[in-house]
Amino acid sequence: MKNQKERLESKDLRIYQILNARSELFDEDKAYLSYLEKGFKGEKKFDEWTSTLSDNWLFLNDLLFECNKSEFQIDSIGINGETIYLFEVKNFDGDYYIEGDRWYKTPKTEIKNPYEQLKRTESMLRKLLIEQKIHFKIKPHLVFVNPGFFYTMPL
């Protein structure tokens, strides 16, 4: 993995793990800790996959930027030539479906639309690159790493 920035646990994840070790968390906080741990595990899985690519790739993970007084976070970018491959990594499991632009976990629990998150991140990255006069193509990708993730099309 010589061409890959190592991914570290987020500040929030470390804080919640410490709090959980020291005291009993509220159910809502336990759920958030589980969400953070699952996300981190999925991102590490993605890192394993990308570590096998050729040396022509440079991967940067878990990036935090500010543009126009707005912060945005990027799970991973892969740089190859003059193209930045933007990756939003999801470790969803279970059955999901989409109606219009709304995403649902079966049976009918609405979740945040990960595609909207990817589009916002792409837009912010594009603005940042323009500000810095950096000319790269951006190719965004949503990556679902969990083999237990299933998408069904509604009839």
Image: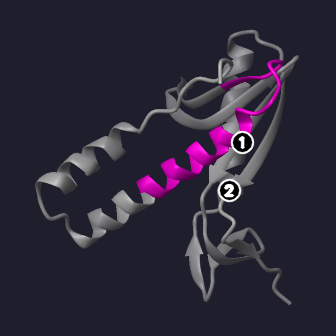
Name, please, the residue furthest toward the top. 133
Task: Quickly name the residue at label 1.
Answer: 49
**At 80% across and 31% down in the image, what residue appears?**
53
Q: Quadrant of the N terminus?
A: top right
**At 75% across and 29% down in the image, what residue appears?**
78
**Amino acid on which disc 2 is placed:** Val
| Main secondary structure type of the part rendered in magenta | helix
Q: Quadrant of the C terminus?
A: bottom right
Relative image position of residue 54 (x, y in whole percent): 83, 25
Relative image position of residue 4 (x, y in whole percent): 64, 24
| Region in magenta | 36-59
Do we see residue 120 in this rendering? no
Circles 2 and 1: CB distance less than 8 Å?
Answer: yes
Q: Is residue 62 above or below residue 142?
A: above
State the CA–CA distance, disc 2 to disc 1.
Answer: 10 Å
Residue 146 lies in the magenta-colored region: no
Query: Which mark sits nearer the N-terminus, 2 or 1?
Result: 1
The one of 150 and 53 positioned closer to us in this rendering: 53
Q: Is residue 13 left or right of residue 128?
A: left
Relative image position of residue 139 (x, y in whole percent): 84, 36
- Label 1: how many residues lie within 10 Å, few (<14), some (14-19) or many (20+)? few
Q: Is residue 152 left or right of residue 17?
A: right
Q: Secondary structure at mark 2?
A: loop
Query: Hey, which quadrant is residue 82 in on the image?
Result: top right
Tag shown at residue 126: none
The one of 9 and 139 positioned closer to us in this rendering: 9
